Amino acid sequence: MKKEEVTRCQIHEWYPIFKHVSIKTIIHELPESFVQYLLDDGPFVLPQSVYGEDALPRRINYPEEEDDYQVSEGSGDESEQPPEPPCFKDLELKIKDSIQILGGVVFPKLNWSAPKDSAWIATTGTIQCTSFSEITLLLRSSESLVHDLNHAFDSCVDKSSSRPPKFFLALKKWYSSLRPEMEFRCFVRHKLLVAISQREITSFYPTLLEKKDSLQMLIQDFFAENVREGFESNNYTFDVYVTRDGRVKLFDFNPWGAFTLPLMFSWEELENLEKGENTMAFKIVDKQCAVRPGLKTAVPYDYLDTGPGSGWDEVLRKAEEELRRQFQDSEASA
């Protein structure tokens, strides 16, 4: 794999070309100071909001770090105090405007990856975001984004560095009605569509059994009409979503191999597929016992502290206050 093949799969590279067949997205270049904030492995301090948002804790408490912030009485050593929260005023203002343009709820991702592994920390259990603070919390909590930040070109034979020169935050319009069974990963080898896999492989969807043939035709036609001549690489993958009325929307591009998941296939199997359109393979989870394990979604032990002053203690307290306020408002208006 060459560096240019990985570079083409960055969302800010492909989206301007394919925006007419994708979902609405707004992309922002990230300042290096924010990138360094994401890379910082120190105490988890959320940025100071220019709007005074306090729905999220300023600092997530790590139990094993507690002793680091115990200041003896009268020591006066300010270096032992928790760090001041950073502020990214210009970026926050841009993101706030973009969220409003996109309908109030967005799906964030960096150059290649989305923070799906940190959905557990969100109150909704998803990576839908309505504010800069929510986006930052997901980005800082994600382990999968370490790839984008530090290891993007590790599999390239012509690697000159491990990271791209610039990082971007893409905000995609959030659609709550999307059905996970209608998302598919497509594998292109030598500019031919050789395989399609169900994207959500942790569940069995009986409706896919009866729709499989028609779905294959829709995706093949979409590839021939919109993707094959528009994307320059010979070998790559792309993700699509099929709507209820039979339209196909482009979600993403990824390199062939390397960090891209082959899902229902193995890379060895994909490499051995014959080079011909008539040999295209389409795999779905065709029975309940055939479901596959998903991505790592377990909660890190560091986040399990719910004691007084911890991050979760603050989240629960804020949630309780909000429920109490809503109840009082409803009583007053009754």
Image (tube, rainbow, N blue to C red):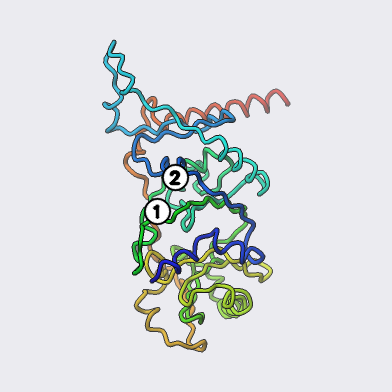
Mark 2 in CB contact with mark 1 (< 8 angstroms)? no
* Residue occupied by mark 2: 35
313 or 224: nearer the viewer: 224
Q: Secondary structure at mark 1?
A: loop
Residue type, label 2: Val
Q: Does residue 323 appear in the picture of this structure? A: no
Which residue is at the far right? 334
315 or 99: nearer the viewer: 99
Q: Quadrant of residue 182?
A: bottom right
Q: Does residue 183 appear in the picture of this structure? A: yes
Residue type, label 1: Ser
Q: Which mark is residue 144?
A: 1
Q: Quadrant of residue 256?
A: bottom left
In the image, is 182 to the left or to the right of 141?
right
- Report x, y in % for residue 222: 61, 75
- Report x, y in % for residue 190: 47, 81
Q: Secondary structure at mark 2?
A: helix
**Which residue is located at x 53 percent, y 74 percent?**
232
- Report x, y in % for residue 97: 65, 42
Quadrant location of the C terminus?
top right
Q: Which mark is residue 294?
A: none
In the image, is 213 to the left or to the right of 40?
right
**Which residue is located at x 37 percent, y 67 percent?**
258
In the rendered image, the vertical position of residue 280 relative to residue 34, given as above or below: below
- Report x, y in % for residue 76: 31, 14
Q: Closer to the camera: disc 2 or disc 1?
A: 2
In the rendered image, the vertical position of residue 167 relative to residue 213, given as above or below: above
